């Protein structure tokens, strides 16, 4: 296999400076990356797979279907529309299963914490009371652990619920949306049940009608967004603290030349939280110093990284496409992985160095990884065992290890939907009113979510291109997952990025001291965006439903099945989405249904566009159409902020609490 060297020539799509720097170093010369594997495959992707019309759901196939060619339907008679819809539905089921299984672990950890069986504690009592009220749990005069235990048990029961009752969190949605779901019969019941039913209905010889298949796909996706993901986010916040704005750093320069570098990669923050605490303890610090290091440096990769970035300000070294590059620095003593988005190749890359890949979850082992099972009841014990292993590797680090130290960007992160309340509304009258008012008066044209993965198939600057276009057009951006990391690397998660905004958004950001792109967390935290949208509806003035809002989402570089589940729960909740690709193009009618027809059902549909600028254009256009429909589409007035307005916007700003100041715009 040809390995591209010398500044990675041939990697025209790599725009990331730190990746190029690392790959051009001598120490990385034997590292084979996913970029190399894509280049060496030398063949175009399978047309049937890309178009969604390859079926292997039974052993009469696999069948490759050509839409419109009679003899090219499935052996069973399945048409292109049936096959493509079944495939998308299964992708959604898989994505939902991943989020749901993650959530189950978090809720089991929450219950163990409430029982006093872990070293964690219930930190956010205010949120505990708020969520308990949704579950009709009495809070008056009760101990926080008692309330948490009842909440945890009620939440866990919903995973395997066998009743036909809708899941509890659904009642948080705007009333109009709840009615739409009821009428369509897509209110989710037990989370696991919706995944099981989806797999059953797409089994050979069951549901053959794509509208009907997609109704269940929506129900399954809603079980994810308004169910398991939302519970995971809320209960993790209660246990580890709801994020508040804080300063941190991102990119490979977060690694430290004179410390034991340990990266945490995956999604579940239970172990990562324990590692953060254990790494500070004296015995571990002493051990690291004995090994010749100045200390222990933890850094995140992917969404485990985003979880501890949001809550603790621990730096994120890399998003998904840089996981191999973290190791290629030769400066990492251990990469600790849990579940999801961990490429098997990391163990092979690590073989070039002194690095251990430590798997920690019984669900996710890999050849050439070292397994240390994370035991929740002895979290500190597991964490210290891992730290000791990493520390013991420090002396073996090659002097040629290369950290691109200048590639380290400042970011401000930690924008939970509660923070948006305080940030714009002030601590005395926290509300979404100022945000809605700014949208209504046109200073902020609308809100766009840029979420999801990055992907070796596409140029890695797409998130940045889209975000810059949006903020230039006065659209506030919310970001999660690896997209947020990539926007942090582009310098857009700093209040100083207000200078890249159109005048009116820039002025709002400068006044409040907030970045124009708000980091809202990991990929399960897209549920925060659902709540933020709901709050905007509830506040009034922007319609009665999510589908009325001048808001839209994109996961331009998605690679994970979870992103398709997220896309469908956004659409089924009334929010349009734009993706760079979706495996539906081989089935004409179904494609049309996904990209147009769903509008009639949900008031939103999928949009597909490959070019990032075109994605941004579509997003801006859709937002302006919503403004038009709301009757608020006047040109934004040039409003100069007087002292009262500044006081209103600035008071109690969460961002102000961490001392961020935006650039001053000359009006
Ligand atoms: Fe072919 Fe039908 Fe079997 Fe799919 S279910 S593999 S289309 S025969
Ligand atoms: S980690 S799902 S690559 S966002 Fe959540 Fe990143 Fe996508 Fe994994």
Image (spheres, rainbow, N blue to C red):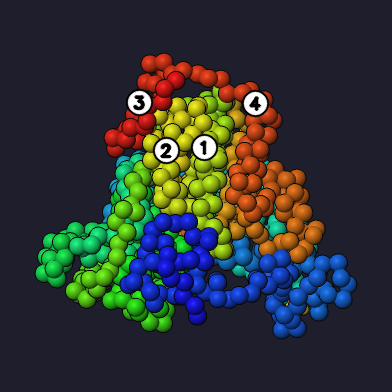
- Give the CA distance from mark 2 to mark 1: 9 Å
Is tag 1's residue or tag 3's residue first in the polypeptide sequence? 1
Q: Where is residue 518, by image quadrant?
A: top left
At 43% across and 52% down in the image, what residue appears? 485
- Give the CA distance from mark 2 to mark 4: 26 Å
Q: Is mark 2 within 8 Å of ligand 2?
A: no
Q: Say which mark, if any, is on residue 651.
A: 3
- Give the CA distance from mark 2 to mark 3: 21 Å
Is tag 3's residue or tag 4's residue first in the polypeptide sequence? 4
In the image, residue 497 above or below residue 266 = above
Is tag 1's residue or tag 4's residue first in the polypeptide sequence? 1
Q: Residues within 10 Å of mark 2 (few under 14, many from 20)?
A: many
Is tag 2's residue or tag 4's residue first in the polypeptide sequence? 2
For this orientation, the residue located farthest to the right is: 70
Q: Is residue 99 left or right of residue 178?
A: left
Q: Residues within 10 Å of mark 1 (few under 14, many from 20)?
A: many
Query: Mark 1 and mark 2 in contact (Cβ < 8 Å)?
Result: yes
* Residue 231 % position (x, y): 46, 53
* Residue 599 % position (x, y): 73, 45
Under circle 4, the secondary element is loop
Is tag 2's residue or tag 1's residue first in the polypeptide sequence? 1
Q: Is mark 3 within 8 Å of ligand 2?
A: no
Which residue matches tag 4? Answer: 633
* Residue 342 % position (x, y): 44, 69
Which residue matches tag 2? Answer: 497
Q: Say which mark, if any, is on residue 471.
A: 1
Under circle 2, the secondary element is helix
């Amino acid at each position: 296999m040809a390995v591209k060297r010398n500044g990675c020539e041939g990697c025209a799509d790599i725009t990331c400076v730190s990746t190029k720097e690392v790959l051009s170093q001598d120490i990385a010369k034997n590292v084979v990356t996913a970029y190399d594997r894509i280049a060496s495959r030398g063949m175009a992707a399978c047309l049937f797979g890309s178009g969604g019309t390859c079926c292997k759901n039974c052993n009469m196939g696999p069948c490759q279907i050509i839409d419109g060619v009679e003899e090219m339907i499935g052996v069973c008679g399945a048409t292109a529309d049936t096959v493509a819809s079944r495939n998308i539905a299964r992708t959604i089921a898989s994505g939902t299963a991943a989020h749901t299984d993650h959530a189950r672990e978090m809720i089991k950890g929450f219950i163990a914490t409430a029982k006093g069986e872990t070293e964690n504690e219930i930190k956010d009592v205010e949120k505990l009371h708020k969520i308990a009220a949704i579950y009709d749990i009495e809070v008056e005069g009760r101990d926080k652990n008692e309330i948490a235990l009842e909440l945890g048990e009620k939440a866990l029961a919903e995973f395997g619920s066998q009743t036909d009752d809708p899941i509890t969190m659904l009642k948080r949605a705007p009333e109009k949306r709840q009615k739409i779901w009821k009428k369509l019969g897509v209110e989710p019941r037990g989370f696991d049940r919706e995944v099981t039913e989806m797999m059953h209905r797409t089994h050979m010889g069951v549901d053959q009608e794509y509208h009907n298949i997609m109704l269940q796909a929506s129900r399954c996706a809603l079980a994810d967004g308004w169910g398991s993901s939302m519970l995971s986010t809320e209960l993790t916040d209660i246990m580890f603290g709801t994020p508040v704005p804080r300063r941190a750093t991102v990119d490979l320069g977060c690694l430290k030349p004179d410390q034991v570098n340990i990266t945490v990669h995956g999604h579940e923050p239970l172990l990562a939280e324990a590692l953060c605490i254990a790494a500070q303890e004296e015995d571990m610090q002493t051990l690291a110093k004995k090994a010749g290091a100045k200390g222990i440096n933890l850094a995140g990769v992917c969404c485990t990284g985003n979880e501890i970035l949001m809550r603790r300000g621990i730096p994120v070294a890399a998003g998904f496409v840089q996981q191999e590059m973290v190791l290629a620095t030769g400066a990492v003593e251990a990469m600790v992985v849990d579940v999801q988005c961990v490429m098997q190749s990391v163990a092979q890359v690590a073989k070039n160095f002194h690095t251990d890949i430590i798997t920690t979850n019984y669900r996710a082992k890999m050849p050439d990884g070292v397994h240390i099972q994370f035991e929740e009841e002895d979290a500190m014990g597991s964490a210290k065992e891992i730290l000791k292993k990493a520390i013991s590797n420090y002396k073996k680090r090659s002097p040629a290890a290369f950290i691109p130290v200048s590639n380290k960007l400042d970011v401000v992160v930690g924008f939970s939907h509660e923070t948006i309340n305080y940030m714009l509304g002030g601590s005395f009258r926290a509300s979404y009113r100022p945000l809605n008012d700014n949208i209504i008066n046109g200073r902020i044209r609308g809100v766009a979510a840029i979420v999801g993965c990055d992907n070796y198939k596409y140029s890695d600057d797409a998130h940045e291109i889209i975000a810059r276009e949006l903020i230039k057009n006065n659209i506030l951006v919310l970001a999660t997952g690896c997209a947020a990391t990539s926007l942090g690397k582009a310098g857009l998660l700093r209040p100083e990025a207000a200078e890249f905004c159109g005048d009116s958004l820039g002025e709002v950001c400068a006044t409040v001291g907030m970045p124009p792109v708000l980091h809202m967390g990991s990929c399960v935290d897209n549920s925060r965006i659902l709540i933020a949208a709901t709050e905007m509806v509830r506040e009034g003035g922007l319609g009665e439903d999510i589908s009325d809002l001048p808001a839209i989402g994109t996961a331009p570089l998605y690679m994970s099945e979870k992103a398709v589940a997220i896309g469908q729960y956004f659409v089924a909740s009334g929010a349009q989405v734009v993706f760079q690709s979706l495996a539906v193009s081989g089935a004409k009618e179904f494609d049309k249904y996904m990209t147009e027809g769903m509008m009639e059902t949900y008031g939103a549909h999928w949009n597909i566009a490959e070019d990032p600028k075109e994605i941004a254009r579509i997003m801006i256009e859709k937002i302006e159409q919503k403004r038009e429909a709301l009757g608020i589409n006047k040109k934004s007035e040039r409003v100069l902020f007087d002292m009262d307005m500044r006081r209103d916007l600035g008071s109690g700003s969460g961002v102000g609490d961490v001392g961020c100041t935006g650039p001053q715009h000359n009006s």
